[in-house]
């Protein structure tokens, strides 16, 4: 029972981790909570679902197309709602981000209606049983794909030119720009990568729960943010760890404490982390510049 | 005589003026972005409804009870979370709002997802008008006092305010307490007008709606909140816009206002001179010319 819950928690947590990565990357670079990230995840799920059901695109191609189109959406949001406010107060940027999120959510609601769409599972439903745990094929695929995406991201951040530019920008924007780094390009790339990961999570949650709705981005979006804070906002390994821990905590809380308070678990964790260790589990300590 | 339909719109405008101006004290004047204001409203709505239904309080006492319980929660939540700054505070208020909603969904005394029914319809136009006047008067007096100047100092620069000897945590909690009190009062008026409340009517999106009213009218401008609340309540009602379009519109307002006129319709307030990008550039140019 315990092991089974642990596996369920890790599967759920790996999708939170993918969402959290988008938050943490953007926060690391422009110090803004990208509220619209949950909506990018929702759009990713919708794009994947429409490509598979309406246009009969093979699943894995649809998966990558959804990631690509969601990156475009992420870049557009940054360009229209965040870039013009880069020099204004943080409050203004945050309000604009909330506005972008509400706008996208209701745009989807208007276009698609509020009823849930079913996302047909592309895989034969197969269940692997051992004496301790049962795991379905979809769950295995979610775990593998999330792992590969995180591996890919780590490579991108650590080894490639753009990754080095991202880390430099996160450390000190002005110095990075003096070193010849085009900050706008780096920010665009960050939004593109973060949004693609969010969309990947959206598609995978879509096939996992077999349902896609315009409101599906709200809660996972908030929880992805909680995961990012839990791990230490701005830290990429932190987001991965935070996502997994949050997924496990949520499933365990639902199983052993009360399933009705399932969604409250994440917010309790958030408030406790913010109070006792706002820098998160492996984040660098926050120091206010005067 | 005005028809029942228009009367309802006027009462809703009045209630929303209370919500928006109390949020403005927290976000506009003290500079603490709260996206959980609906939680205080719901605490007040439930507390006053329960006071009437279970304890048999008279209407006035129930309203007061709603406000006080909400203020208590504002302070209770405020003490630990107000040490947080900026974005972190915003997220913590959001988390608090969601926890309140989930707790109300699962408590027995609040009727769970079904909510509370059969609350007597005590809210009349007179009550609403009196409450609006009292709210605006108290908020106006606070803002024009020493306390108000301290709040504005915190908004302008928290570190500087602290070094000037302002106890920033105390004033932030005060702002949350007063803001929550009036939000709870408004919640009491709400529950005794519609006679029925349920947890999901006070979710995250409701908090955004209040924020939108404040932003449209002008952060840090009490009269702006009056105009913002009136405009965003009455116009969609009169145009009979569907709820979907309304939310789409709210989102667009937040983004567009921040881009073209962050100080809101009424101007002045939080984004005064020296804060906007244009003023920043202007000051740079002036320095160049002065050399």
Image (spheres, coloured by chain):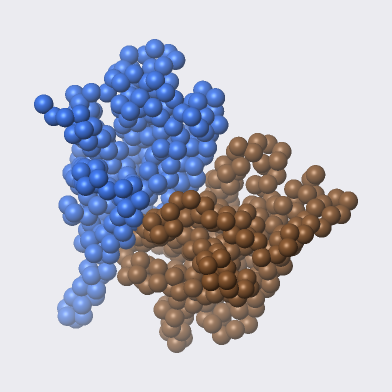
Chain colours: A brown, B blue
Position of B32 with respect to A267 (left or right) is left
Position of B225 with respect to A272 (left or right) is left
Residue drawn at the location 65% of the way across and 36% of the way down: A258
Q: Is residue B32 visible?
A: no
Q: How many marks?
A: 0
- Measured as percent of width and height from the top left, residue A194 is found at 53, 69
Position of A286 with respect to B182 (left or right) is right
Q: Is residue A119 visible?
A: yes
The answer to whether A138 is drawn above or below residue B186 in the figure is below
Location of the C terminus of chain B (image quadrant): bottom left
Quarter where residue B20 is shown: top left
The answer to whether B5 is drawn above or below residue A180 in the figure is above
Q: Nearer the viewer, residue A142 or A274?
A: A142
Residue with the most extreme left position: B1
The answer to whether A269 is drawn above or below residue B41 in the figure is below
Residue drawn at the location 52% of the way across and 52% of the way down: A116
- Measured as percent of width and height from the top left, residue A53 is found at 56, 65
Residue with the most extreme bottom position: A180
Location of the N terminus of chain B (image quadrant): top left
Residue with the most extreme top position: B56
Residue drawn at the location 35% of the way across and 60% of the way down: A96
């Amino acid at each position: 029972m315990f092991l089974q819950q642990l596996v369920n928690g890790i599967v759920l947590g790996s999708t939170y981790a993918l969402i959290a990565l988008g938050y943490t990357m953007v926060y690391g670079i422009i110090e803004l909570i990208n509220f619209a990230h949950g909506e990018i995840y929702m759009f990713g799920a919708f794009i994947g679902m429409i490509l598979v059901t309406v246009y009969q695109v093979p699943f894995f191609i649809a998966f990558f197309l959804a990631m690509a189109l969601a990156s475009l959406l992420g870049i557009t949001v940054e360009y229209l709602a965040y870039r013009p406010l880069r020099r204004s107060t943080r409050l203004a940027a945050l309000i604009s981000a909330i506005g972008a999120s509400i706008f996208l959510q209701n745009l989807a609601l208007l276009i698609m209606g509020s009823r849930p769409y079913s996302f047909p599972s592309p895989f034969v439903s197969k269940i692997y049983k051992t004496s301790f745990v049962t795991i379905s094929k979809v769950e295995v695929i979610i775990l593998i794909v999330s792992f590969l995406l995180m591996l890919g991201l780590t490579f991108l951040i650590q080894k490639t030119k753009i990754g080095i530019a991202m880390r430099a920008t996160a450390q000190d924007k002005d110095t990075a720009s003096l070193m010849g780094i085009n900050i706008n390009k780096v920010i665009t790339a960050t939004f593109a990568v973060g949004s693609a990961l969010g969309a990947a999570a959206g598609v995978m949650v879509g096939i996992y729960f077999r349902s896609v709705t315009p409101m599906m981005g709200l809660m996972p979006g908030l929880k992805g943010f909680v995961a990012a804070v839990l791990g230490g906002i701005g830290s990429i390994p932190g987001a991965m760890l935070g996502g997994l821990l949050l997924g496990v905590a949520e499933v365990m809380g639902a199983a052993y404490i009360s399933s009705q308070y399932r969604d409250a678990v994440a917010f309790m964790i958030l408030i406790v982390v913010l109070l006792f260790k706002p820098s998160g589990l492996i984040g660098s300590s926050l120091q206010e510049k005067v | 005589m005005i028809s029942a339909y228009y009367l309802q719109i006027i009462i809703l405008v009045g209630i929303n003026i209370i919500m928006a101006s109390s949020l403005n004290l927290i976000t506009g004047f003290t500079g603490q972005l709260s996206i959980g204001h609906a939680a205080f409203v719901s605490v007040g709505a439930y507390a006053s409804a329960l006071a009437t239904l279970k304890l048999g309080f008279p209407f006035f006492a129930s309203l007061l009870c709603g406000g006080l319980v909400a203020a208590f929660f504002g302070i209770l939540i405020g003490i630990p979370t107000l040490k947080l700054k900026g974005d972190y505070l915003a997220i913590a208020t959001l988390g608090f709002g969601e926890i309140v909603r989930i707790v109300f969904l699962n408590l027995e005394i609040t009727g769970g997802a079904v909510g509370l029914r059969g609350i007597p319809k005590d809210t009349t136009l007179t009550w609403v008008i009196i409450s609006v006047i009292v709210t605006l008067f108290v908020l106006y007096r606070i803002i024009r006092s020493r306390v108000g100047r301290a709040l504005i100092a915190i908004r302008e620069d928290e570190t500087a305010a602290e070094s000037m000897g302002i106890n920033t945590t105390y004033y932030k909690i005060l702002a949350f307490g007063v803001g929550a009190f009036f939000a709870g009062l408004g919640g009491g008026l709400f529950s005794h007008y519609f006679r029925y409340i349920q947890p999901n009517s006070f979710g995250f999106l409701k908090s955004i709606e209040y924020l939108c009213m404040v932003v449209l009218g002008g952060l840090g401008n009490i009269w702006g909140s009056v105009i913002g609340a009136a405009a965003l309540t009455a116009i969609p009602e009169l145009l009979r816009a569907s709820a979907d379009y309304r939310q789409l519109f709210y989102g667009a307002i937040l983004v567009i206002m921040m881009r073209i006129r962050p100080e809101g319709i009424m101007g002045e307030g939080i984004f005064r001179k020296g804060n906007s990008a244009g003023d920043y550039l202007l000051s740079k140019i002036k320095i160049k010319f002065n050399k």
